[in-house]
Image: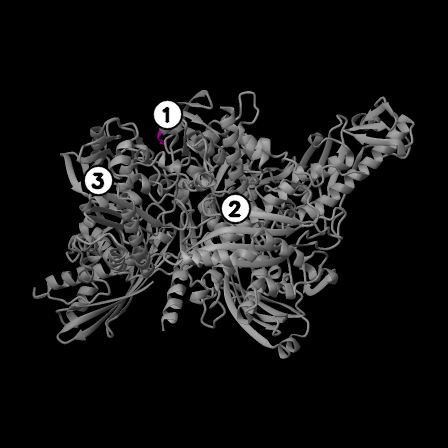
C-alpha cells in the first residue's frame, strides 16, 4: 500500500491541504496535485533548474524535494510572480523587453531563481548574473537576453525602491 | 523518473533517527537531498525506508569553539558561506563553497550530507581532509569521534555503520599568519571538479612554518599531500618551493573514468597544487 | 501600401502567457480517465528477444496492461514507414513501434506499461522479465565496415546503409593543375536535441467521433499525421495531430517516433486517453541524435591560395535505424563549396549502421559539418601558405557579380543549389571590424607577455534556407472584427505568432493584438508542412503576406460597394475602412464581415464570397541562401587545457528581417549551440554500446557561466526568391561556430604546433597536444 | 570485458578437477554469492550481493556448467543474473582450464563479463565498474584457491598470480582480508581491492 501523508502548505499566498504519496516530488505535486503547471520538470535530477521554486523565499529544485517536506512551508511558483492585478513584475517585464525567452520552458526556473538572486544581490555584475543562472539550462536563447533582462530589472528595482 | 516506493520517516530528534536506523533494514538518510534525490529519481538507489533529518533540531548550526569551529551536520551549505565565524577563522570554506553546485542546491545541501555521500570530487570532503577535521557520529551505543583521515574507507564509502548518524564536524582553527588557496578545474561552473586542490600555509619570518595540501577528484577519496607539506616547512613561500610541491602532486595515484585518464588527473594535480599554494601565499592575513 | 510592422523590434505576443506560467505544454494537459504509460527499453545494444513475461508486472496494483509487439496484433505488426524515401538507401531499416524479436540499440522500446500513474508504471517496468540473447554490437563508425565488424542487424550482411556522392566540375584537372595539394582528416561529433522540454504524447481514440487525436511535442504535426495514418492504414481524415506549446525542438522533434505510434495504439487498446512523457534518461537513448562523422579531404589550390578543387570521403554514422531518410548526410554535402567559388568537388559518403540511437538532424542538420569541412580546408591552405585566414577567404568568395551562382551541388530532390544573393566579402569586413580583428595581434602579444595564450579564428558560411514547397496561411475577418490567422507551422519558440501577426496586421490595417493566431493543429489548417531547416519565415512569411493582401482587396472592394465610394479613396486603419477626405464615413472590418453573413441586415453584393477570407500557399521560388561570417577569440590555459571563449562576433545576412529582435535571439542561441558542439557536448558509448553520458552532470550543455557575450551585426540583402525578400535565420548562428572556435584554439597554440582533428575539443587532448608540441620544440 | 586470471593449486590435476566441478562446494567462493537451489545436475540458482558506493545491488540468477571436457580438463560456466530491483544485469562466461604444473595444477580462468542496464550507464564510475568486475574474478580465484588448499594437505601456499590481487594493491588503510573465503565480507572486500587496483589506473577510461 502506498505510503501517504497529509500535508498543509501555502502556495502563492493560498493555503492548501492535501494527501500526498511520500515519494512524490514537490514539483510533481505542484503540477499535478495543485494544477500549477507553470513549474516545469526538465531533468528530474537537479541540474537543469527548470523546476526551481521558492520555498520560504529561497530558490530550490522542486525535483529534489519531496512534497511531504514542504509541509508547513511557504512556496512561491512562477504563477505567483506577477503583481496582484496580473501585470508583469519588473523581472518578467524585462524578460519580455529583452527577448529573454523563446520556447519558454526554462523560463519559470529562470524567473524564480533570479527573483531570489536579485533580492540578495541588488546590484550584480554581468559575471554575477551568469554564475547565478549557471544552474539553469536554456537551450534556446544563448542566455544573452536573460542576462540583459536580469541586469535591466536590477536597475529598475533599485530605482523603484 | 519517479522514485520507487519507500516508507517515509521524519524523526524530530537524533536519538529517534538512530533508533529508526537500528530497527529498519535498507534505510537511507535524507539530509539536504541534493545527491540522494537524483539517485532516488533515477532509481539507482531503491531503499525500503527514507529517514528525513530535516525536522531534527540541534544538529544544525555553527558555533565558535575558540580553537575550532563546531558545525552541525545539517547545516546548509548556504549558511556555511554566509557565516561570520567561518569567514573570519576558515575563509577557505566559503571560498571553496562558491564552487559547490549552484546557489539553489546550496540552499538545501548540507555539510553532513556531502561528507556522508563522499563523492570523490566533492569540495567539502577535500576541505575536511585539509583540516583533518573531527567528525562526531552517534550510534546506539552513543557518540564516537572519527578523524577525517579515517572517514573515507573507499569510493563513496564513509566509515559509518548502518545504524549510525553523523551529527557534527569540528574544524580546527589555524592561527598565525595563514593564507589559503582553493582552486579546481571543472568543465563548467558548478560541475564536480575533475581535480581540486586546497592549501593552507602559515608563514613566520619569511619561512613556511606549517602547510597543508589536499587534492580532491583525482582519487577515489581526498588525498593529503603530506610529503609536499613536510618539504614546504622551513622553505620560503616562493615559486621554487611551490613547483617542487607540484612535482610531488604529479606523482599521486589517480583514477581514470570514461572522460579522462589518470595521467591527465596527475597533470592537473600538479598545476592546481602550484596555483593553490601561490594563492595561499598571496593572501597571508596575519590572523585567520 | 505600407507594411508598418515589418522590420520593427516588436515584443513577442507569446511572452506574457509564458512569463506567468500559463503556457500549455503536453504534460500540462490532463483528461478525464487518462492513464499513464512508461516504456520498457532495451538494456543492451544488440540482442534477440527470446521471450517476454509480464505476469509479475501485470499483477501489480494500479497496472492496467502491459503491451508488447505481440499484443499489437497482425494488423499492426509491420515496421514503420520511411518518412523520406530515397533511392540511395540500400538498406531501409525502420523500427517497429515495439521491438518484435530483435533490439538494435540501448533504449529501443520493447513494451509499454499502462497504469494509474507514471510512478506505478515505472514500478512495473522492473517486474517485466525479458529473456535476451545478447548479440555482438557495432559501435565505432570507423571500423563498422571492416570485414570482421559485428553486424548492427542480425539479418543483414553489411553495415553499409547507403552511399552518396556530390560531384561536379573537372576534379582531375583541378588537382592536376594545382600548385599545392594539402590534406586533412578529422572527426566531427554533434550531440543530441536536449530541448528543455522532453518529448511527450497524449493519444485519445474516439472511433465514433473525432477518430484518433494526438497531442505531441513535435515540429511537424502534418508529417506525423501522414506517417501515422499510413502506418495505421487509415485515412488522414481520421487522424488529428496537435502540437501545443513546444519547449524547444532543434530537429529531433521533427520526426515520427515509435512512441507516437505505440501510444496511439495503447489508447485504442485501453479505450481511454493515454499519456507518455519522455523522462530525461529516456531522452538520451530514445530521441534521435546526430553524433559522428569522419571526413578525409584533399584540397587543391594555387600558390596564391585560390582553391581549385576539393575531394575526399566521409563516413557518416547513421545509428541503428533510418527514421529520417538521408537528410543528414545529404545536408552535409549540399553546403560544399561553402561561401567560396570552388570549380570542382568530388566527395563520397558512406552511411553506416551502428548499434546506437538512430540519428537525425540537430540544429543545422549536416550543414555545420559540411561548412566545418570547407572551413577547415581553407584554414589548412591559410596555414600551409602563410596567408592570413581572412585574406584566403577574400580570394575565394563567390562575388556579388557572380550571383545568382550555381555551385554545381544538388539540394534535396536533385534541385540545383543556387546562391541567390549576398556579399560575402562585405560581410567578412563587417565582422572583422566588429571583432577588432586587425588589432588582435597586439592583444595577443600583450597577453603572451603575461604568459597567457590568446587565439583568434574566422569562419564563413552559407545556409540553404526556406526549403519548400510551401507553408500556407489562412486569414479571415470575423464578425467581431478580430482577424483569425491559421497556419500549419508549429512553433518551438521562434515566435511565429508575433512574426505572422506583424505581417498580417501591417498588410490588412489592423492592430497585431487583434490577430487571433492558431497553428500546428491539423484540424484547423489542413495542409501544412513543419518547422525545420530555417524554412518558416521564407514560406509562411510570403503566404501570410499574400493572404492578408487578398483579404484587404476583398474588404476594400466590399466597402466600396457598401459605402458607395471609389475603392481608390479607401484605406484601412486599425480595422476600420475610411474614405479619404470624408472622415465620418467609415465601416469596420467586422461590420463588413457581417455584411456577408446570411440573414444578416446586410446585403451580399453579387460576385462576393460569403466570407472575408483568403488562403495562400505563396512561398519562395527556390532556397534563399543566408550567409554569415564569424570571429571567435579564445584563451587557452596550457596548465589545464581549458578553453575560454572571450569574444564572439557575428555578421549575418538573412535578407529582410521581419523582427530583428527575434532574428538576434535566433543567432545568439544558435552560436551558443555551436559552441556547445565545439567544446562541450559529447554523447559517449562504451565498446558494448552502453551509453555513458546519461545525465546533465556528464553530458555537458553550454551554461551561461562559460558562454561569451555574442556581438551581432546584420546586412540585409533581400532575397529575389520571395515577396518579402526574407531568408531563414534559425541555424545561421550554429553552422559556422565550431570552425571559428577550433581555428582560434589552434591560433592560440601556434607555438606548440597544435593541429586539432576532432571536436568537441576536450581539455585532456589539448594538454596532450601541448605537451607533445613542447617536447618537440625542446628537441 | 575480457579478463584472464590464473592460480596454482597444490594438488594433482585429477584431484583438483573433481573439486572444480563440485559446484555446491566452490559456489561460496564467489564473492558475496549464495547458492539457493540446485536445478538439475549442472544448473544452479543463486544470489550475489555487491555494493558500489551508495548503490547496493543484489543479482539473482543462474549458473550452468555448459561444457565439460574431462580429457582436456576444460570446463565452461555460464552465469547471468538480474539486479532484483531492475537496475540491470550481469552475465559472464567463465572458462576454467586445468593444466599440470609440476606435481600441482594451474587453473587458467578466462572470463567474458558484460554489464547492461543503468548500472552500466554511469561514466564517472565506468573505470570503477570495470575494476569491480575484474575483482569478482580475482577474489573468486583467491577464495577457491583457499578452499581447495584447505582440502589439500594443508600446505596451501598457492601462489596467486591473478591479474589484480591484494598485494599489488596494498594500501595504508588495510582492507579486510579478502583472501578469507568469508562471504559476509568478501562482497565488500572485493570492492575495496577493486578500488586500490583502480587507484593504480590499472583500468583506463575508454572515452
Q: Is residue C88 above or below residue C190?
A: below
Q: Label 3 crowding class (10 Å Cα cut-off): few <14, some 14-19, many 20+?
A: some
- For label 2, the residue is C709
**Mark 1 against mark 2, which lies toward the viewer?**
2
Instruction: State if disc 3 and disc 1 touch (CB < 8 Å).
Output: no
Read off the chain for label 2.
C
Q: From the viewer's perspective, tell me whether residue A137 is left or right of residue C228.
A: left
Labels 1 and 2 in the same subunit: no
Instruction: State if disc 2 and disc 3 touch (CB < 8 Å).
Output: no
- For label 1, the residue is A71
- For label 3, the residue is B162
Query: In 3D space, how far apart are the residues under numbered discs 1 and 3 (Cα atoms)?
Result: 28 Å
Q: In front here: A80 or B25?
A: A80
Give the farthest residue toward the front: B205
The boundaries of the magenta stretch are: A1-6
Question: Where is residue C577 drawn, in percent x and y?
Answer: 82, 28
Query: In 3D space, how far apart are the residues under numbered discs 3 and 2 (Cα atoms)?
Result: 50 Å
Q: In front here: C406 or C431?
A: C431
Question: Where is residue B28 drawn, in percent x and y?
Answer: 28, 38
Q: Is residue C180 magenta?
A: no
Say what secondary structure mark 3 lies in: loop
**Mark 3 against mark 2, which lies toward the viewer?**
2
Q: In front here: C101 or B103?
A: B103
Q: Label 2 crowding class (10 Å Cα cut-off): few <14, some 14-19, many 20+?
A: some
Amino acid at each position: 500500500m502506498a505510503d501517504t501523508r497529509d500535508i498543509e502548505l501555502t502556495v502563492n499566498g493560498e493555503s492548501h491541504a492535501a494527501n500526498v504519496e511520500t515519494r512524490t516530488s514537490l514539483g510533481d505535486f505542484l503540477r499535478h496535485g495543485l494544477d500549477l503547471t507553470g513549474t516545469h520538470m526538465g531533468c528530474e535530477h537537479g541540474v537543469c533548474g527548470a523546476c526551481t521554486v521558492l520555498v520560504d523565499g529561497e530558490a530550490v529544485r522542486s525535483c529534489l524535494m519531496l512534497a511531504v517536506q514542504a509541509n508547513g512551508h511557504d512556496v512561491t511558483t512562477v504563477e505567483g510572480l506577477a503583481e496582484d492585478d496580473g501585470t508583469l513584475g519588473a523581472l518578467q517585464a524585462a524578460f519580455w523587453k529583452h527577448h529573454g525567452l523563446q520556447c519558454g520552458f526554462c523560463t519559470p526556473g529562470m524567473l524564480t531563481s533570479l527573483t531570489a538572486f536579485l533580492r540578495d544581490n541588488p546590484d550584480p555584475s554581468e559575471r554575477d548574473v551568469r554564475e547565478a543562472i549557471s544552474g539553469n539550462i536554456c537551450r534556446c536563447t544563448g542566455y544573452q537576453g536573460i542576462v540583459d533582462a536580469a541586469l535591466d530589472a536590477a536597475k529598475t528595482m533599485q530605482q523603484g525602491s | 523518473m519517479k522514485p520507487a516506493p519507500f516508507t517515509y520517516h521524519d524523526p524530530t530528534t537524533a536519538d529517534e533517527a538512530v533508533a529508526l536506523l537500528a530497527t529498519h533494514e535498507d534505510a537511507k538518510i535524507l539530509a539536504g537531498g541534493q545527491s540522494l534525490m537524483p539517485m532516488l529519481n533515477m532509481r539507482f538507489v531503491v531503499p525500503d525506508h527514507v529517514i528525513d533529518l530535516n525536522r531534527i533540531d540541534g544538529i544544525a548550526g555553527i558555533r565558535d569553539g575558540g580553537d575550532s569551529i563546531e558545525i552541525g551536520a545539517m547545516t546548509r551549505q548556504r549558511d556555511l558561506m554566509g557565516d561570520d565565524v567561518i569567514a573570519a577563522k576558515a575563509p577557505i570554506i566559503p571560498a571553496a563553497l562558491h564552487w559547490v553546485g549552484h546557489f539553489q542546491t546550496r540552499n538545501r545541501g548540507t555539510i553532513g550530507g556531502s561528507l556522508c555521500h563522499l563523492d570523490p570530487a566533492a569540495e567539502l570532503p577535500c576541505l575536511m581532509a585539509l583540516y583533518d577535521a573531527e567528525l562526531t557520529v552517534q550510534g546506539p551505543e552513543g557518540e564516537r569521534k572519527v578523524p577525517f583521515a579515517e572517514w573515507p574507507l573507499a569510493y563513496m564509502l564513509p566509515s559509518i555503520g548502518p545504524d549510525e548518524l553523523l551529527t557534527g564536524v569540528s574544524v580546527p582553527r589555524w592561527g598565525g599568519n595563514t593564507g589559503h588557496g582553493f582552486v579546481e578545474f571543472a568543465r563548467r561552473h558548478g560541475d564536480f571538479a575533475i581535480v581540486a586542490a586546497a592549501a593552507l600555509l602559515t608563514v613566520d619570518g619569511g619561512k613556511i612554518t606549517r602547510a597543508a595540501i589536499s587534492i580532491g577528484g583525482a582519487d577515489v577519496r581526498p588525498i593529503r599531500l603530506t610529503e609536499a607539506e613536510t618539504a614546504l616547512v622551513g622553505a620560503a613561500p616562493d615559486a621554487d618551493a611551490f613547483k617542487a610541491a607540484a612535482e610531488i602532486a604529479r606523482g599521486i595515484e589517480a583514477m581514470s573514468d570514461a572522460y579522462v585518464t589518470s595521467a591527465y588527473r596527475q597533470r592537473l594535480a600538479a598545476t592546481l597544487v602550484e596555483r593553490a599554494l601561490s594563492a595561499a601565499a598571496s593572501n597571508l592575513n596575519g590572523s585567520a | 501600401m505600407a507594411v508598418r510592422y515589418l522590420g520593427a523590434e516588436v515584443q513577442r505576443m507569446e511572452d506574457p502567457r509564458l512569463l506567468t506560467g500559463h503556457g500549455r505544454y503536453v504534460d500540462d494537459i490532463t483528461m478525464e480517465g487518462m492513464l499513464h504509460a512508461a516504456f520498457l527499453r532495451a538494456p543492451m545494444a544488440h540482442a534477440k528477444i527470446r521471450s517476454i513475461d509480464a505476469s509479475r508486472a501485470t499483477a501489480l496494483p494500479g497496472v492496467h496492461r502491459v503491451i508488447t509487439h505481440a499484443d499489437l496484433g497482425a494488423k499492426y505488426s509491420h515496421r514503420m514507414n520511411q518518412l523520406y524515401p530515397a533511392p540511395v538507401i540500400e538498406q531501409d531499416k525502420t523500427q517497429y513501434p515495439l521491438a518484435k524479436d530483435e533490439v538494435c540499440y540501448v533504449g529501443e522500446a520493447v513494451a509499454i506499461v499502462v497504469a494509474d500513474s507514471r510512478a506505478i508504471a515505472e514500478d512495473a517496468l522492473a517486474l517485466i522479465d525479458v529473456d535476451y540473447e545478447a548479440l555482438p554490437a557495432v559501435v565505432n563508425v570507423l571500423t563498422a565496415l571492416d570485414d570482421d565488424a559485428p553486424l548492427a542487424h542480425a539479418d543483414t550482411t553489411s553495415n553499409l546503409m547507403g552511399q552518396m556522392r556530390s560531384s561536379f566540375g573537372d576534379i582531375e584537372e583541378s588537382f592536376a593543375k594545382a600548385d599545392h595539394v594539402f590534406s586533412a582528416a578529422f572527426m566531427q561529433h554533434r550531440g543530441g536535441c536536449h530541448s528543455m522540454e522532453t518529448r511527450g504524447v497524449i493519444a485519445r481514440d474516439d472511433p465514433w467521433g473525432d477518430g484518433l487525436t494526438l497531442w505531441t511535442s513535435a515540429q511537424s504535426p502534418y508529417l506525423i499525421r501522414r506517417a501515422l495514418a499510413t502506418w495505421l492504414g487509415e485515412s488522414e481524415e481520421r487522424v488529428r495531430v496537435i502540437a501545443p506549446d513546444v519547449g524547444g525542438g532543434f530537429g529531433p522533434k521533427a520526426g515520427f517516433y515509435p512512441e507516437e505510434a505505440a501510444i496511439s495504439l495503447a489508447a485504442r487498446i485501453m479505450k481511454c486517453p493515454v499519456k507518455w512523457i519522455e523522462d530525461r534518461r529516456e531522452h538520451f537513448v530514445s530521441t534521435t541524435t546526430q553524433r559522428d562523422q569522419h571526413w578525409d579531404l584533399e584540397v587543391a589550390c594555387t600558390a596564391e591560395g585560390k582553391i581549385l578543387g576539393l575531394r575526399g570521403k566521409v563516413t557518416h554514422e547513421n545509428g541503428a535505424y533510418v527514421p529520417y531518410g538521408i537528410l543528414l548526410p545529404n545536408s552535409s554535402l549540399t553546403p560544399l563549396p561553402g561561401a567560396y567559388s570552388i570549380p570542382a568537388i568530388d566527395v563520397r559518403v558512406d552511411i553506416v549502421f551502428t548499434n546506437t540511437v538512430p540519428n537525425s538532424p540537430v540544429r543545422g542538420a549536416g550543414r555545420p559539418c559540411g561548412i566545418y569541412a570547407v572551413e577547415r580546408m581553407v584554414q589548412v591552405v591559410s596555414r600551409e601558405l602563410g596567408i592570413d585566414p581572412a585574406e584566403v577567404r577574400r580570394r575565394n568568395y563567390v562575388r556579388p557579380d557572380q550571383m545568382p551562382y550555381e555551385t554545381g551541388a544538388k539540394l534535396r530532390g536533385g534541385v540545383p543549389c543556387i546562391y541567390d544573393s549576398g556579399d560575402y566579402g562585405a560581410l567578412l569586413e563587417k565582422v572583422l571590424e566588429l571583432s577588432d580583428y586587425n588589432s588582435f595581434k597586439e592583444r595577443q602579444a600583450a597577453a603572451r607577455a603575461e604568459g597567457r595564450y590568446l587565439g583568434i579564428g574566422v569562419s564563413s558560411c552559407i545556409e540553404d534556407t526556406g526549403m519548400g514547397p510551401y507553408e500556407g496561411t489562412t486569414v479571415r475577418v470575423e464578425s467581431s472584427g478580430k482577424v483569425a490567422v491559421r497556419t500549419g507551422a508549429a512553433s518551438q519558440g521562434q515566435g511565429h505568432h508575433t512574426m505572422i501577426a506583424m505581417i498580417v496586421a501591417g498588410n490588412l490595417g489592423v492592430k497585431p493584438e487583434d490577430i487571433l493566431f492558431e497553428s500546428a493543429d491539423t484540424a484547423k489548417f489542413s495542409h501544412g508542412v513543419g518547422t525545420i531547416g530555417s524554412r518558416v519565415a521564407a514560406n509562411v512569411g510570403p503566404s501570410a503576406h499574400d493572404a492578408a493582401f487578398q483579404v484587404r482587396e476583398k474588404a476594400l472592394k466590399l466597402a466600396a460597394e457598401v459605402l458607395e465610394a471609389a475603392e481608390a479613396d479607401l484605406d484601412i486603419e486599425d480595422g476600420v475602412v475610411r474614405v479619404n477626405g470624408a472622415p465620418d464615413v467609415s465601416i469596420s472590418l467586422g461590420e463588413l464581415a457581417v455584411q456577408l453573413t446570411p440573414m444578416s441586415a446586410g446585403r451580399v453584393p453579387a460576385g462576393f464570397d460569403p466570407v472575408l477570407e483568403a488562403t495562400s500557399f505563396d512561398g519562395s521560388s527556390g532556397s534563399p541562401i543566408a550567409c554569415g561570417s564569424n570571429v571567435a577569440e579564445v584563451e587557452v590555459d596550457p596548465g589545464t587545457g581549458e578553453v575560454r571563449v572571450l569574444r564572439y562576433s557575428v555578421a549575418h545576412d538573412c535578407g529582410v528581417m521581419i523582427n530583428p529582435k527575434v532574428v538576434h535571439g535566433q543567432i545568439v542561441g544558435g552560436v551558443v549551440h555551436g559552441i556547445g558542439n565545439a567544446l562541450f557536448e559529447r554523447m559517449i558509448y562504451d565498446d558494448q554500446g552502453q551509453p555513458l553520458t546519461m545525465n546533465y552532470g556528464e553530458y555537458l550543455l553550454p551554461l551561461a557561466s562559460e558562454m561569451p557575450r555574442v556581438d551581432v551585426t546584420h546586412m540585409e540583402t533581400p532575397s529575389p526568391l520571395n515577396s518579402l525578400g526574407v531568408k531563414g535565420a534559425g541555424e545561421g548562428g550554429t553552422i559556422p561556430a565550431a570552425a571559428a572556435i577550433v581555428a582560434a584554439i589552434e591560433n592560440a597554440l601556434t607555438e606548440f604546433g597544435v593541429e586539432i582533428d576532432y571536436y568537441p575539443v576536450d581539455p585532456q587532448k589539448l594538454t596532450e597536444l601541448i605537451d607533445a608540441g613542447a617536447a618537440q620544440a625542446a628537441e | 570485458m575480457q579478463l584472464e586470471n590464473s592460480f596454482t593449486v597444490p594438488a594433482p590435476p585429477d584431484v583438483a578437477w573433481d573439486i572444480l566441478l563440485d559446484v555446491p562446494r566452490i559456489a561460496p567462493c564467489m564473492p558475496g554469492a549464495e547458492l539457493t537451489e540446485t536445478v538439475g545436475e549442472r544448473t544452479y540458482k543463486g544470489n550475489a550481493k555487491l555494493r558500489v558506493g551508495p548503490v547496493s545491488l543484489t543479482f539473482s540468477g543462474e549458473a550452468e556448467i555448459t561444457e565439460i571436457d574431462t580429457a582436456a580438463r576444460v570446463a565452461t560456466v555460464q552465469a547471468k543474473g538480474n539486479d532484483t530491483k531492475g537496475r540491470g544485469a550481469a552475465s559472464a562466461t567463465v572458462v576454467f582450464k586445468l593444466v599440470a604444473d609440476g606435481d600441482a595444477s594451474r587453473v587458467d580462468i578466462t572470463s567474458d563479463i558484460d554489464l547492461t542496464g543503468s548500472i552500466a550507464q554511469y561514466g564517472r564510475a565506468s573505470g570503477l565498474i570495470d575494476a569491480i568486475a575484474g575483482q569478482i574474478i580475482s577474489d573468486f580465484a583467491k577464495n577457491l584457491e583457499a578452499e581447495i588448499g584447505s582440502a589439500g594437505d594443508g600446505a596451501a601456499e598457492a601462489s596467486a598470480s591473478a591479474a589484480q590481487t591484494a598485494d599489488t594493491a596494498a594500501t595504508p588503510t588495510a582492507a579486510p582480508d579478502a583472501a578469507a573465503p568469508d562471504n559476509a565480507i568478501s562482497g565488500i572486500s572485493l570492492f575495496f581491492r577493486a578500488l586500490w587496483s583502480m587507484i593504480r589506473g590499472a583500468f583506463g577510461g575508454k572515452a
